[in-house]
Image (cartoon, rainbow, N blue to C red):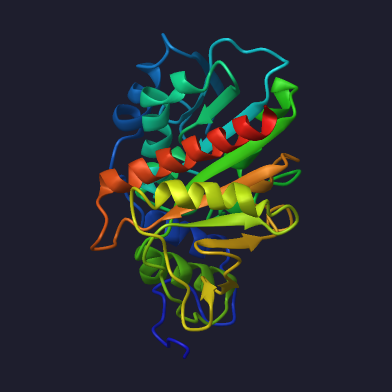
Amino acid sequence: MIDSRPYPIGRLHTPWNDAEKAAWRASTRIQRSYQSEVVNAIRALADRFELLQYGALSYDPERYPLLALKSPGWHQDKPTVLISGGVHGYESSGVHGALTFARERVQDYQDRFNLIIAPCISPWGYETINRWNPNAVDPNRSFYPNSPAQESAALMRLIESLQVELLAHIDLHETTDTDELEFRPALAARDGVEYVPGIIPDGFYLVGDSDKPEPEFQAAMIAAVRQVTHIAPADDQGNIIGSPLQQPGVINYPTKKLGLCAGLSDAPFVTTTEVYPDSPSATAEQCNQAQVAAVCAALDYLNATEE
């Protein structure tokens, strides 16, 4: 069924022009502080990691430095794993799950892996609780050469500068009620198409890479997260967000083709986590801990396969 409610910006069948993008940008507002909630938390870990500033957003370079943590004991002979969060800035547990892992669990893995933790790829999106950047560009569809999103381009430059091949990339996300209430209607309006409502999955799920699905890797994370929060069931068509279920709690996307963050490298093991913080059966802290459980399970699986 097609929802006929008009989005307040734009016209049906007509993609947004610059004036409409500006009107959308003017409708956003700062709702929380990247500096106090994220930058300070990252800098508090500087005595335990190598702190990397890999850029700053041109929208406000002082307000939006791009920061990552590089684990101690870095050695070229160790496998390297990237943990990223906040590609969609509004997805809070992606950011705070990455920070929680860095604070509480990284010491369990730093002897076996080189770890790069980039907790908040999109700080403007974090502050405005938004999926896009100020130019109405989705960073999580922009991980390709000559990216239109400076957030995505900066992370790709960071990984290239390390001159390592990633063994794995775990990208931490959420699916929220606002996906259907705001972000997908805005996307339809931006692109000049009709908005067709979808179904928000109630629970945790993973998005693997259809070109290298690694089902046992995904299953190990699902098993671990199941101890923390519930796993999203398929809908009546056997899908999650329109994609066929591959195993409990797992669907696959072509990550490189779609320009997703999880497809930024040629790492053989990749996944995108999705938690549902609006569920009546999950708290914000459970969502953070579900992200941590997924990361730890991924690293445990990789460690067992490397031995």
Residue 139 or residue 174, whichever sits in front:
174
Task: Examine the rendering and report whether any part of residue 156 can be seen.
Answer: no
Residue 267 or residue 224, whichever sits in front:
224
Quarter of the image for residue 58 reads top right
Residue 206 percent location from the top left of the image: 52, 55
Quarter of the image for residue 215 reads bottom right
Write the residue at 42% across / 13% down: 46
Quadrant location of the C terminus? Answer: top right
Q: In the displayed structure, does residue 110 sit left or right of residue 215?
A: left
Q: Residue furthest bottom?
A: 1
Write the residue at 39% across / 16% down: 45
Q: Is residue 49 above or below residue 239?
A: above
Q: Is residue 286 above or below residue 280?
A: above
Q: How many marks are shown on the rendered structure?
A: 0
Residue 222 or residue 42, whichever sits in front:
222
Q: Is residue 168 above or below residue 140?
A: above
Residue 158 percent location from the top left of the image: 65, 27
Residue 168 or residue 260, whichever sits in front:
168
Write the residue at 50% across / 65% down: 20
Q: In the displayed structure, does residue 252 sit left or right of residue 182?
A: right
Residue 94 percent location from the top left of the image: 43, 43
Task: Examine the rendering and report whether any part of residue 160 can be seen.
Answer: yes
Q: In the displayed structure, does residue 226 sit left or right of residue 271?
A: left
Residue 37 percent location from the top left of the image: 30, 31
